[in-house]
Image: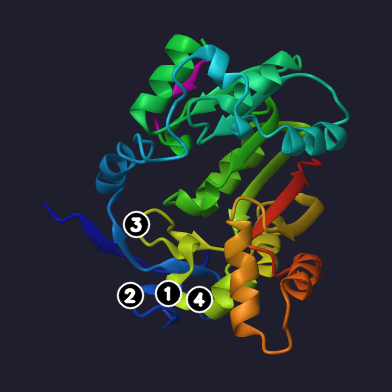
Amino acid sequence: MNEVEKINCLFCDSDKAVPISKRADIVTCLSCGVSYLRTRPTQEAMYQIYQGYANEASHMRPPDSVQEAKQAGLRRNYFIDEIISLANNTKGIWLDVGCGWGALLDEIRDRGYSPKGIEMTRNCLDFATMQLQIPVSNSQFIDSKIDAGSCKVVTMVHVLEHLPYPRQTLEKIYNVLEVGGVYCGIVPNIESVCSKYLKDDWVWLDPQHHYVHYSPKTLADVLKAAGFTILKMYTSIGDYDYNAVIECISKNIKEISTTEMAKELAVKLEIDGKGEEIRFFVRKDK
């Protein structure tokens, strides 16, 4: 069975692209500017790859107990606080796509929302459903049965870059949100400082798991094309290793001579759209 496929641009279907990697067939579309893995695993092969995504060596592995789950950083309180402020703190169904073992959903349930999740990795799904008792589906999001206009919030934290059909995904998110509902997420930034200098050694290039790479501009473009109103978008070092960012700046920017200078520049680069991840908050207005 063939486990790889070669594709055109996932947003505009153009076959015109330029390579940006020497280790994998990662290209930038000459038509719309989106970067993507042109030769990639098939959807069936992707499913098998993700069964090992949250193994014992991964920070995504399920906790050993519900009590441990209540203390996990993956609950992402900082991100939830931002979302709730933009959603006017009105309750409803909160769908987390790529929910892992349910950390974020367990937190939002404690805050009065109705949690639903989608997760491809079986051991994560098992913990979410059996231990946390959160309803989680094992299907691809675009194949999931979700009522139109039923969700108040949809989230994807470091997930959109993993999905094989992002344009159709954004269209479905728009469909399942109620009017006034918000879609919020985090993705790696292909225009980050570490991406620029480390190139193929940038950790988040990750051709095994990351199939699309966004910049602030291309992400804004595809979100607007799907009908969303952008409420807020910014870059941050975020989940990337902070010390690795400081080291990258110190080694590659000749004007930087001290660690303190590197730390100050890191803050400025975040503001200038060069942070390692992009955080976005958009709304369905009609």
Helix, strand or loop at mark 2: loop
* Mark 1 → mark 4, Cα distance in angstroms: 6 Å
Mark nearer the N terminus (1 vs 3): 1
Number of other residues with Cα within 10 Å of mark 2, as a class: few under 14, some 14 to 19, many 20 or more: few
The amino acid marked with disc number 4 is Leu
Query: Left of 81 or right of it: where is 144?
Result: left
**Among the 4 quarters of the image, the one containing residue 187:** bottom right
**Contact between labelled residues 1 and 2, with CB atoms less than 8 Å apart:** yes
Magenta segment range? 134-139
**Contact between labelled residues 4 and 1, with CB atoms less than 8 Å apart:** yes
Residue occupying image coordinates x 47% and y 11%? 131
Magenta segment's dominant SS is loop
Number of other residues with Cα within 10 Å of mark 1, as a class: few under 14, some 14 to 19, many 20 or more: some
The residue that mark 1 highlights is 200
Of badges 3 and 4, nearer the viewer stands 4
Q: Position of residue 160 (x, y in %)?
A: 54, 49
Helix, strand or loop at mark 3: loop
The residue that mark 2 highlights is 23
Please, is residue 84 above or below residue 192 in the view?
A: above
The amino acid marked with disc number 1 is Asp
Relative depth, front residue between 38 and 260: 260
Of badges 4 and 2, nearer the viewer stands 4
Residue occupying image coordinates x 19% and y 54%? 3
Residue occupying image coordinates x 41% and y 26%? 124
Mark nearer the N terminus (3 vs 4): 4
Residue 208 tag number: 3
Q: Looking at the rendering, in which quadrant would you find the C terminus?
A: top right
